[in-house]
């Protein structure tokens, strides 16, 4: 089970500091959507140079212009880029094709998707990696709920989980054996991010 650190609503300096503090415990560095909007592709390039051995995910949340956005993220140094599950099949196909050409990966974000039919279509399109995700705004009504696993039950995907995951709700979540646990604010807003990340990894 891998631990992905999500860097959201942070400055460049805070993002670098927190990544350095948690580096030993995390497997994947996620450059959050807002951080990318603030700094553009240069922040991905900078992280690639600073953390050459880590897997970097660019949370592009692409929903159109798939080829262009996937190339942008991969050329900047991302190993994985994210694409929204509700996007056109053409967008999904295009991003998967670019990823294959460049030897990288696409994570399909199932945010707000509750249809197993759509999940079956994604499988048909060749998707391998998905994320079950409760968005930041929706978290005011409740954090990640293990009922979300039902959406992908019986499908052969690598599954990531995200949405307010912390040390309290983690034990129930890992019973479902997700491949990747994504944690953002529970680590980045902590007084000692390194200690929380180490506990989560353990
Ligand atoms: O993609 C995201 C928000 O859209 C976040 O990266 C993800 O939800 C993890 O952050 P947190 O643990 O703070 O919810």
Image (cartoon, rainbow, N blue to C red):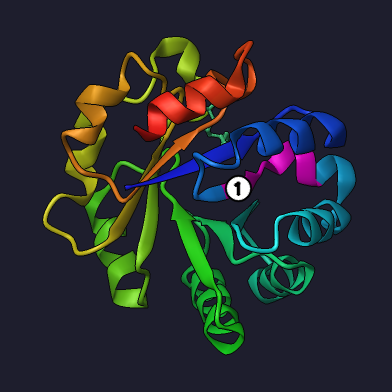
- Magenta residues span 29-36
What number of labels is visible?
1
Where residue 66 sits: x, y (%)?
Answer: 64, 70
Along the viewing direction, whichever of 35 and 124 lies nearer the viewer: 35
Question: Left or right: where does residue 156 sit relative to residue 64?
Answer: left
Residue at disc 1, secondary structure? strand
Asked if residue 11 can be seen in this view, the reply is no
Image vertical order of residue 144 relative to residue 131, above or below: above
Quadrant location, ligand no. 1? top right
Task: Inspect the magenta stretch and tell me whether residue 149 lies in it.
Answer: no
Residue found at the very far bottom of the displayed protein: 101
Along the viewing direction, whichever of 174 and 115 lies nearer the viewer: 174
Where residue 97 sits: x, y (%)?
Answer: 54, 83
Circle 1 sits on which residue? Answer: 29
Q: Residues within 10 Å of mark 1 (few under 14, many from 20)?
A: many
Image vertical order of residue 179 relative to residue 156, above or below: above
Q: Quadrant of residue 95?
A: bottom right
Where residue 139 sits: x, y (%)?
Answer: 47, 18
């Amino acid at each position: 089970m891998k631990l992905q650190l999500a860097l959201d609503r942070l400055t460049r300096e805070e993002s670098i500091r927190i990544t350095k503090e948690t580096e030993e415990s995390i497997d994947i560095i996620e450059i959050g959507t807002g951080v990318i909007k603030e700094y553009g592709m240069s922040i991905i390039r900078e992280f690639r140079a600073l953390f050459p051995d880590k897997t970097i995910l660019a949370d592009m949340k692409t929903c159109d212009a798939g080829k262009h956005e996937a190339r942008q993220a991969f050329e900047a140094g991302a190993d994985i880029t994210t694409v929204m599950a509700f996007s056109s099949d053409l967008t999904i196909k295009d991003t998967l094709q670019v990823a294959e050409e460049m030897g990288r990966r696409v994570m399909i974000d199932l945010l707000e998707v509750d249809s197993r039919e759509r999940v079956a279509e994604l499988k048909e399109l060749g998707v391998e990696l998905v994320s079950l995700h409760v968005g930041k705004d929706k978290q005011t009504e409740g954090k990640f709920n293990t009922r979300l696993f039902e959406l992908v039950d019986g499908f052969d995907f690598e599954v990531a989980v995200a949405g307010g995951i912390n040390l309290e709700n983690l034990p129930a979540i890992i019973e479902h054996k997700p491949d990747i646990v994504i944690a953002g604010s529970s680590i980045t807003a902590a007084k000692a991010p390194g200690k929380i990340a180490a506990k989560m990894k353990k």
